[in-house]
Image (cartoon, rainbow, N blue to C red):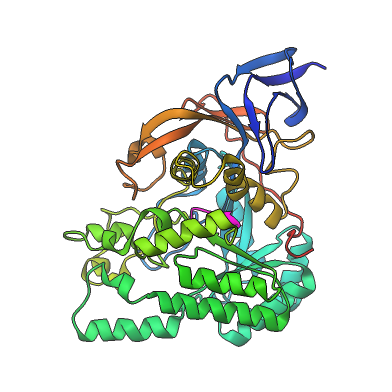
């Protein structure tokens, strides 16, 4: 067979296997895995490199409404470009329903934001903020059939959070339609109470964002979300877990027989609440929810990744510029932590951080790395086996990793829209030196191939493996 591209002499890694093979690519698909493949228009020498499935980041916020006068730093162009720099070939972004808006109206807006602007493949999770009878009874079932098979609900943020009865109704619709629900677990009433107490005491600095969102508020909401899912008998995903107490709620739910997926993020491995307590307003750079915790919580999150409590390692990329009146240092945010936009950039640094801190330091093996960053995302969100592995017939989304490449992270190299990275100066060992999307090289030696048009496509999805 004549191939469009052959990747030679690399070590192929999937979630279950590691083996030496050449990869033959034809018409955007993997067509052969064998030794001695040579007949191709293009031959890529991968000697000394790992040949991995492209990363799938299933928790990314792009071009999302963020409050009066606040503008998210990444649109779909810059955000997906940064994702590609970090070895990702697919991102799942959120389509935010605003109050009074139908889901189809929201989707029309987000498709217009994304269409023709993406460097990697994309798909949407539906964020449900207004679960009316029409939304749950008519729109959502039809949209699930159309391939929008996952949705998210919030237990915090006024304007976004749902009451328990609304969560139950949404979960019941998910059960009947086969959709998968992601839940942001924090107790909004407890948070608002603590904000009030802090205001009485004159505590307005960025560091107090963390103390108004304590571990107990996340643990309680996690337990409540799992209890609501148990009542309705439906699987859920608990996203961006930051600490042992919430993680143990997931472990106990599994022991009771519930189908649960857990997710954590780089900020909970690498940052602590002390990062919010910097001179001046620099702590605003690290404001996100849930906030980073402490060293013991970092250790717990590593344990969850190692032991399988967490199925997903996502970025929760939610970027805002720091030194910008439409970003972290807006006028109200300068005076009160409550008005600092919640979120940090991280779509480009997710994979290098886990590879360097996890694989290269012996915390996880490379097969577990592939599972946590690609395969499990594809399975949970209805993209497998088209995405998330290296096998004959799958999309040729391939990241070539050099385990010996040493890199010191700087903001400029990440090509996102934010003016900072929380990981500035971090020394990384191991880097994605080339990325192919459906067989076409879109990143080479750490930079985008500028001569190519934006190659990303929208992906309709099947139902989750967790639902079946």
Residue plotted at (47% across, 33% down): 431
Can you give x and y, in whole percent of width and height, for residue 247 in the image? 52, 68
Q: Does the magenta stretch include residue 313?
A: yes
Position of the C terminus by quadrant: bottom right
Residue plotted at (44% across, 57% down): 318
Image check: 173 left or right of 91?
A: right
Can you give x and y, in whole percent of width and height, for residue 162 in the image? 55, 80
Q: Residue furthest right?
A: 1
Q: Does the magenta stretch include residue 142?
A: no
Can you give x and y, in whole percent of width and height, for residue 49 in the image? 56, 25
The residue range painted magenta reads: 311-315
Question: Does the image show residue 45?
Answer: yes
How many tags in the picture? Answer: 0
Residue plotted at (39% across, 37% down): 428
Position of the N terminus by quadrant: top right
Image check: 175 left or right of 450?
A: right
Given residues 389 and 441, the one toward you in this image is: 389
Question: Does the image show residue 326?
Answer: no
Given residues 386 and 368, the one toward you in this image is: 368
Residue plotted at (74% across, 19% down): 35
Snapshot quadrant of residue 134: bottom right
Q: Is the magenta stretch mostly helix, strand or loop?
A: loop
Image check: 48 left or right of 322?
A: right
In the rendered image of this protein, does residue 1 appear above or below residue 141? above
């Amino acid at each position: 067979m004549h191939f469009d591209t052959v990747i030679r002499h690399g070590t192929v890694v999937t979630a279950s296997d590691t083996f030496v093979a050449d990869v033959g690519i034809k018409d955007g698909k993997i067509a052969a895995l064998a030794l001695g493949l040579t007949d191709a228009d293009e031959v890529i020498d991968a000697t000394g490199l790992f040949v991995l499935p492209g990363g799938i980041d299933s928790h990314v916020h792009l071009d999302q409404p963020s409050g009066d006068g606040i503008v998210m730093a990444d649109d779909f162009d810059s955000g997906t470009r940064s994702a590609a720099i970090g070895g990702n070939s697919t991102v799942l972004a959120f389509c935010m329903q605003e109050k009074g808006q139908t889901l189809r109206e929201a989707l029309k807006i987000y498709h217009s934001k994304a269409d023709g602007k993406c460097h990697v493949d994309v798909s949407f999770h539906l964020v449900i903020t207004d679960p009316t009878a029409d939304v749950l009874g008519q729109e959502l079932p039809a949209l699930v059939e159309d391939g929008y098979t996952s949705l998210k609900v919030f237990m915090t943020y006024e304007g976004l959070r749902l009451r328990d009865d609304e969560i139950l109704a949404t979960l019941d619709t998910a059960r009947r339609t086969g959709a998968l629900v992601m839940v942001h677990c924090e107790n909004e009433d407890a948070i608002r109470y603590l904000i009030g107490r802090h205001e009485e005491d004159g505590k307005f600095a960025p560091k107090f964002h963390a103390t108004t969102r304590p571990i107990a508020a996340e643990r309680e909401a996690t337990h409540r979300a799992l209890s609501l899912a148990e009542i309705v008998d439906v699987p859920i995903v608990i996203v961006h877990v930051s600490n042992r107490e919430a993680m143990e709620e997931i472990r106990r739910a599994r022991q009771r027989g519930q189908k649960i997926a857990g997710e954590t993020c780089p900020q909970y491995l690498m940052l602590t609440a002390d990062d919010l307590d910097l001179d001046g307003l620099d702590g605003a750079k690290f404001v996100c929810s849930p906030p980073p915790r402490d060293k013991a919580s970092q250790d717990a999150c590593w344990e969850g990744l190692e032991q399988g409590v967490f199925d997903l390692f996502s970025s929760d990329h939610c970027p805002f510029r720091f030194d910008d009146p439409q970003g972290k240092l807006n006028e109200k945010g300068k005076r009160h932590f409550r008005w600092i936009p919640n979120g940090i950039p991280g779509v480009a640094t997710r994979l290098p951080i886990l590879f360097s801190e996890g694989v290269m330091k012996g915390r996880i093996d490379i097969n577990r790395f592939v599972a946590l960053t690609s395969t499990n995302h594809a399975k949970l969100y209805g993209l497998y086996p088209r995405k998330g592995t290296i096998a004959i017939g799958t999309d040729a989304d391939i990241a070539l990793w050099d385990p010996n490449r040493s890199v010191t992270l700087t903001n400029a190299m990440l090509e996102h829209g934010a003016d900072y990275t929380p990981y500035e100066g971090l020394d990384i060992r191991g880097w994605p030196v080339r990325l192919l999307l459906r067989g076409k090289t879109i990143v080479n030696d750490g930079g985008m191939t500028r001569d190519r048009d934006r190659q990303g496509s929208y992906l309709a999805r099947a139902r989750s493996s967790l639902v079946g």
